Amino acid sequence: MSRMQYGVTEASAVNDWVEDAVTHADVVIVGLGCAGVCAAIEAREAGADVLVLERASGGGGVTAMAAGHVYLGGGTRVQKAVGVEDNVEDMYTYLVMNTPDPNEEKIRAYCEQSVEHFNWLVANGVPFNDSMYQGKHVLQMTDECLIWSGNEEVYPFREKAVPAPRGHKVAEVGHLGGAKMMELLTARAEALGVRILCDAYVTELVREEGRICGVRYRAFGEEKGCIRARKGVVLAAGQFTENDELLEEHLPELLVDGYTRQFTPYDDGAGHQLGHSAGGSLKHMGGALVTAAFYPPESHIKGILVNRLGKRYVAEDSYHSRSSLFTTRQPDRKGWLIVDEATYAVDPPHYGAYPLVDAFESVEEMEKALGMPDGSLQQTMRSYNRAAEQAEDPEFHKGKKWLTPLDHPPYAALDASVGAATYMAFTLGGLDVSIDGEVLTEEGVPVPGLYAAGGCASNIAQDGTGYSSGTCIGESTFFGRRAGRHAASQ
Ligand SMILES: Cc1cc2nc3c(=O)[nH]c(=O)nc-3n(C[C@H](O)[C@H](O)[C@H](O)COP(=O)(O)OP(=O)(O)OC[C@H]3O[C@@H](n4cnc5c(N)ncnc54)[C@H](O)[C@@H]3O)c2cc1C
């Protein structure tokens, strides 16, 4: 099946405007994920008549697959309730340090308004419990809220910004916090009078005298005509993880066997393509969240990650997508986690866990079995253990609480290599947008009438090495709100 060619058409050539009460609006929003629903609520509250077009038979998008972590800080109600001290400056410094090409204006606004954004989510029905998950986990399966979800305690970030946990999980036992968030925000939008049309597949933007003034859509393969947007169109159509052609161009690595891409069938980058065809520029398209987490069990963080040369390559207490991306950059994308009898633990299997290669009585035997150069792993372990005895790690500065000599044989090698462990991935790049979601051209000029937010826009999250869980939903909802508000004000 050939792919849809998304594009832009001139209003003068349109002869199928749908002119009924249902199908025109002040603000038309393309896609009902967390970005779209937040844009819709804000635009409606600003007085606009809002219509959301959703390609699927119901809203949710990738958001409904998410655990529902939202990266928020600076002193939220939950942080205060559990005794976590945080402030805007530390959050700002941390996010700037973790972002390869930081937009300081956006990050500052995100941090300064983080408490307000938390309060807004709560006021609009999203619940967060006043509790904290105390272990080191990728995704707490409880309904506890706060979790360390990034590199806050990792070197060099901890040196510059006082660490604080900022991952806020929607109050839901298990991994469906994102679905709950969508259900509640969608109900809120509908209660405010936002109109939602499902099975409405947007294929083109309509332009009039240089301004985006509508969209063309289909339903069940049938052309339905064009809908007028009197104030603006907000693209909130999600990521491009499903689209092989776009990946080939921007992120060919994700097409390598061994990566498990996570997407909905409609993650074909429609928003990216629609915006690009109207003159919008794309940014950070080579960025992806790529991860295979080796914790829990958290005792494995006391192990070391080594490549096929027997050398360490990252601080093992890094957030899991950071250590994972470093593994994917090693020769042949190979790596192993080495633990000893004292640190090895068997937890219930979880997504991404590294399979056990074998147990070995000596480091020498393990080095041979893993095909590493003679003496290499032995040397690495000797110097690691020597420093760990002093609770030091001069090479990678792993945090002291994770430092212990690995000197209790037998040793276990767990396979971190791409293809052996399951590396899940989704894309992060999107349309360049202003702080208010206006789609920008290569020259940085807004495309009149056109906005983007969420997975099809580029705001804060740019790559996996600096990613903290919760940033995607955090920025999608935050900048989605701003886009909706700005569009409504036109
Ligand atoms: C398994 C998984 C877990 C995750 N967990 C987290 C987490 O806990 N915290 C976090 O911050 N991030 C998480 N993420 C990332 C995060 O979920 C997404 O970045 C975010 O939800 C994107 O929201 P969105 O509104 O932009 O897109 P989506 O939620 O995907 O919504 C886009 C909507 O647009 C619709 N659409 C697409 N094309 C069209 C079209 N042409 N016409 C009409 N409608 C269209 C789609 O059907 C979809 O409903 C996770 C991602 C995955 C894959």
Image (cartoon, grey):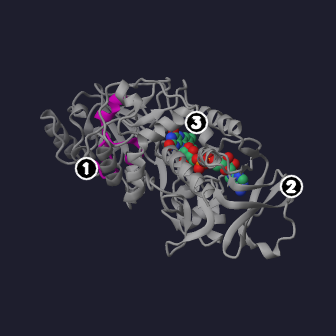
Q: Secondary structure at mark 2?
A: loop
Q: Quadrant of residue 225?
A: bottom right
- Give the quadrant of the C terminus: bottom right
Picture disc at residue 20:
2
Picture disc at residue 374:
1
- Image position of 24 (left or right of 344): right
The x, y position of residue 377, in whole percent, is: 25, 45
The amino acid type of the residue labelled 3 equals Gly
- Real-space CA distance between mark 1 and mark 2, rounded to the nearest whole angstrom: 76 Å
Q: Are marks 1 and 2 in contact (CB under 8 Å)?
A: no
Segment tinted magenta in the rendering: 298-322
Q: Which mark sits nearer the N-terminus, 3 or 2?
A: 2
Q: Is residue 55 above or below residue 299?
A: below
Q: Is residue 315 magenta?
A: yes
The x, y position of residue 85, in whole percent, is: 29, 33
Q: Mark 1 vs ligand 1: CB under 8 Å?
A: no
Badge 2: how crowded within 10 Å, few (<14), some, or many (20+)? few
Pick whichever, 142 or 60, lies toward us.
60
